[in-house]
Image: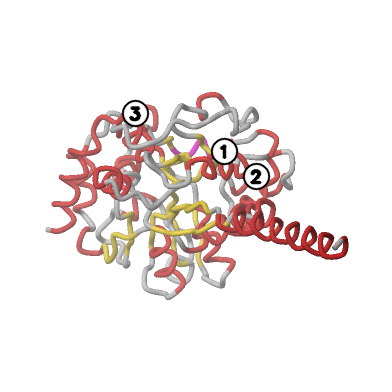
């Protein structure tokens, strides 16, 4: 009998361990981003290490956009937990009550500036939108003014959304960064009109990087990390910081997220210094955690939008202006690019 009790106890203990392990493995967090090399870098820096450390399944998906978050929340069919959102998307999602408040008892983000720790989002990287060019077509480089010069022939790609492209057009046309907002949309569209027949693609960053690597375009306005990775992959391209527009990427949690507790824990992991630094090692976007900067090779800083010599050549996207004007501008932009 004693032996049977011992065996029974051993079996129950083993079963308990199995059930606990099974419960842990059933936990999940779904993170939406943009695909391509940026999401590859996120996978290496955040998704895989967090899954290994926590036992939680991290499912990465693509399609991050304000419109998709709004559709999910309004339909009640929310399948995403955490979303990587650009500043204007974050601002509009917060304004429209589409996000869960972040739990800063779980998310320890003291190393991140206070202005990037809001009720509904935490800024985790800075990136630059940059003019890039094919060095075989433009051996002496290309300027923002040349991008919008119809006599300079080339296949051009600009972002799918109006953010960045309108700013780029105005900066290229001589508007100073300090005078950029409120955006003169009429003037920006007139500048773009000069080369509209040479714009072959209004694309997201991942698609634009693919076009560069496939030799389908000659000039592009693209995030610095994307073109940097295209160059690493063999593209004979270069880029500059003139008329660049810097922005912040935010972690947010969708209202009604299926795994809100895991979402907070994931974000906490992703904003820690070493994990932010690891993202920068994989793609040159600037960490927001001041302690992460200390972990990076100083040479890496020269490829970041926050590097002083880079920052002075461009502007910073004004998410508050876009928060107030996005719907009207986007409707006009959608009509413009279709005609």
User: Considering only order in the chain, which callout, 2 or 1, is on the residue closer to the N terminus?
Assistant: 2
Q: Is the C terminus in the top left, top right, bottom left or bottom right quadrant? A: bottom left
Q: Is residue 216 left or right of residue 119?
A: left
Between the C-alphas of marks 1 and 3, the distance is 20 Å
Foreground residue, 304 or 283? Answer: 283
Name the secondary structure under disc 1: loop
Question: Residue under circle 1?
Answer: 306
**Residue found at the very far bottom of the displayed protein:** 214
Query: Of label 1 and label 3, which has the lower sequence position?
Result: 1
Kindly give the residue lying farthest to the top in the view shown. 114
The answer to whether residue 3 is above or below residue 49 is below
Q: Is residue 314 left or right of residue 145?
A: right
Calculate the distance from the C-alpha at mark 2 to the C-alpha at mark 3.
28 Å
The reply to whether dot 1 and dot 2 touch (C-beta < 8 Å) is yes
| Residue 163 coordinates in the image, percent (x, y) | 32, 44
| Quadrant of the image occupied by residue 34 | bottom left
Of circles 2 and 3, which is in front? Answer: 3
Residue at 55% x, 53% y: name it: 27
Residue at 41 percent of width and 59 percent of height: 62
Q: Is 182 rendered above or below residue 70?
A: above
The foreground one among 104 and 232 is: 104
Q: Which residues are magenta?
A: 309-314
Q: Earlier in the sequence, mark 2 or mark 3?
A: 2
Q: Residues within 10 Å of mark 1 (few under 14, many from 20)?
A: some
Q: Position of residue 203 (x, y in %)?
A: 32, 60
Residue designated by label 2: 301
Q: Secondary structure at mark 3?
A: helix
């Amino acid at each position: 009998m004693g032996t049977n009790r011992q065996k029974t106890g051993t079996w129950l203990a083993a079963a308990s361990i199995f059930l606990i392990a099974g419960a842990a493995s059933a936990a999940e967090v779904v993170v939406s981003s943009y695909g391509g090399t940026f999401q590859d870098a996120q996978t290496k820096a955040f998704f895989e290490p967090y899954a290994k450390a926590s036992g939680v399944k991290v499912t990465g998906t693509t399609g991050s956009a304000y419109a998709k978050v709004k559709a999910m929340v309004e339909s009640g069919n929310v399948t995403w937990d955490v979303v990587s959102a650009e500043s204007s998307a974050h601002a509009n999602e917060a304004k429209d009550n589409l996000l869960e408040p972040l739990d800063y008892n779980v998310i320890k983000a003291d190393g991140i500036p206070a202005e990037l720790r809001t009720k509904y989002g935490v800024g985790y990287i800075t990136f630059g939108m940059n003019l890039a060019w094919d060095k075989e077509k433009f051996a002496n480089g290309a300027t923002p003014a040349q991008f919008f010069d119809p006599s300079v022939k080339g296949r051009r790609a600009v972002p799918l959304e109006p953010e960045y492209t309108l700013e780029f057009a105005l900066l290229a046309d001589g508007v100073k960064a300090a005078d950029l907002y409120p955006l003169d949309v009429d003037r920006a569209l007139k500048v773009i009109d000069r080369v509209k027949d040479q714009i072959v693609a209004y694309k997201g960053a991942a698609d634009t990087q693919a076009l560069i690597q496939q030799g389908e375009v000659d000039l592009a306005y693209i995030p610095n990390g994307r073109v940097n990775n295209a160059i690493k992959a063999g593209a004979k391209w270069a880029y500059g910081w003139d008329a660049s527009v810097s922005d912040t990427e935010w972690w947010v949690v969708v209202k009604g997220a299926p795994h809100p507790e895991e979402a907070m824990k994931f974000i906490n992991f992703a904003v820690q210094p070493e994990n932010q630094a690891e993202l920068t090692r994989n793609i040159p976007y600037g960490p927001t955690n001041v302690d992460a900067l200390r972990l990076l090779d100083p040479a890496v800083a020269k490829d970041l939008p926050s590097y002083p010599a880079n920052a002075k050549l461009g502007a910073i996207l004004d998410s508050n202006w876009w928060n107030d004007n996005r719907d009207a501008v986007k409707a006009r932009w959608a009509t413009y690019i279709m005609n």
